[in-house]
Image: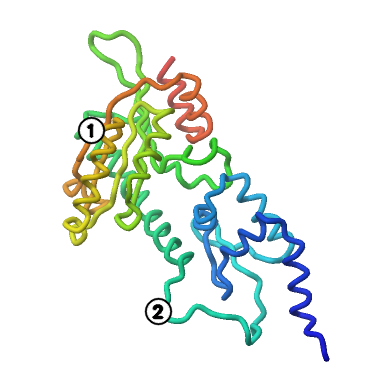
Amino acid sequence: MPVDRSDTQEMVVFMDLVPDQQALLDCVPQDGSAISNLTAQKLLGWETDRYWAARDALVDAGMVVRGKGRGGTIRRVVDAGPPADVVSVPVGVADPAREVEAVIQSELALYEPMRKVIAGDWAKDHRSDPLAVEVTALQGRRSTGGTWSRPDIVSVEIRTFAYVPGKHLELATFEIKLAAALNVQAVFEALAHRRSATRSYVLAHIPATEAVAMEDIVGDIAEVARSHGIGLITAGNAEDYETWEERVEAQRVEPDPERLDTFIATQLTDRTKNLISRRLR
């Protein structure tokens, strides 16, 4: 009986993969389409260094190839003519990896317009004059301290007061969520960020067409946010501050100075770090 060498070779390669490499490969679509690094990492729930070690090993082994896209993408190396017994996802059947990919890509599209609103109308409304407002979510393989250590947007301000001496560093973090991905976990992500910030917010994009259906969920999240001092903002339109509503006001805290200093060193750009240093002198 003739031996199918392609199947045999594939089996050997898979046997050589360590568990992390196999787990990552299982997340990559079998049809050769791409998945972003961020999507794969979130699906696996891994920290940055663990993900990149497995990704690089698969690239070196020729199992996946890198591609372009926000945060970079990977795809399987597949033959032009796949074996007949390869099972494809039927039309109309949900593909969890692609659903998560769609959610993440939609969230990524919110970062820049929301950053502009935070730096503009939101800052004016809160009588704030930020030194910088940065998107901190897209830092690739750069280590920033593990799971939930990296907020999506950070606003930095140096405040002075008429009757209180000194200069005061204010650092606000924003965890961006789509309506489709919104749940109470967002509050705990923001709470993790607040260990290194003075205020933290959940900023949820909820279009007007979904607002009524989401009201109970938003109410539950608001209750949890309020109990932990986390702010909650809903936005019907990412670019229009007139559609933003502050459901819960964020409580100000005084973070540990060493943790705050580490956060600034690992999360912010050199330009912003230099601005902070100059203004605090």
Compared across the picture, whether 72 is left or right of 136 comes to right
The colour mode here is rainbow
Q: Position of residue 191 (x, y in %)?
A: 38, 34
Q: Quadrant of residue 245?
A: top left
Label 1 near label 2: C-beta < 8 Å?
A: no
Q: Nearer the viewer, residue 94 or 199?
A: 94
Q: Sequence order check: which comes first, mark 2 or mark 1?
A: 2
Q: Position of residue 67 (x, y in %)?
A: 58, 63
Q: Amino acid at mark 1?
A: Glu
Question: Residue at the location (56% across, 48% down)?
Answer: 46
Q: Which mark, residue 249?
A: 1
Q: Quadrant of residue 87?
A: bottom right
Q: Which mark, residue 204?
A: none
According to the picture, the residue beneath numbered tag 2 turns out to be: 92
Q: Look at the picture and state if 202 lies above or below 18.
A: above
**Quadrant of the drawing holding the C terminus:** top left
Q: Secondary structure at mark 2?
A: loop
Q: Position of residue 221 (x, y in %)?
A: 27, 43
Q: Nearer the viewer, residue 49 or 263?
A: 49
Question: Residue at the location (51% across, 60% down)?
Answer: 69
**Quadrant of the drawing holding the N terminus:** bottom right
Question: Residue at the location (80% across, 81% down)?
Answer: 5
Q: Secondary structure at mark 1?
A: loop
Q: Amino acid at mark 2?
A: Gly
Q: Look at the picture and state if 238 lies above or below 74.
A: above
Q: Position of residue 235 (x, y in %)?
A: 23, 49
Q: Look at the picture and state if 2 lies above or below 35.
A: below
In front of the other: label 2 or label 1? 2
Compared across the picture, whether 69 is left or right of 219 comes to right
Question: Residue at the location (39% across, 31% down)?
Answer: 194
Q: CA distance from mark 2 to mark 1?
A: 42 Å
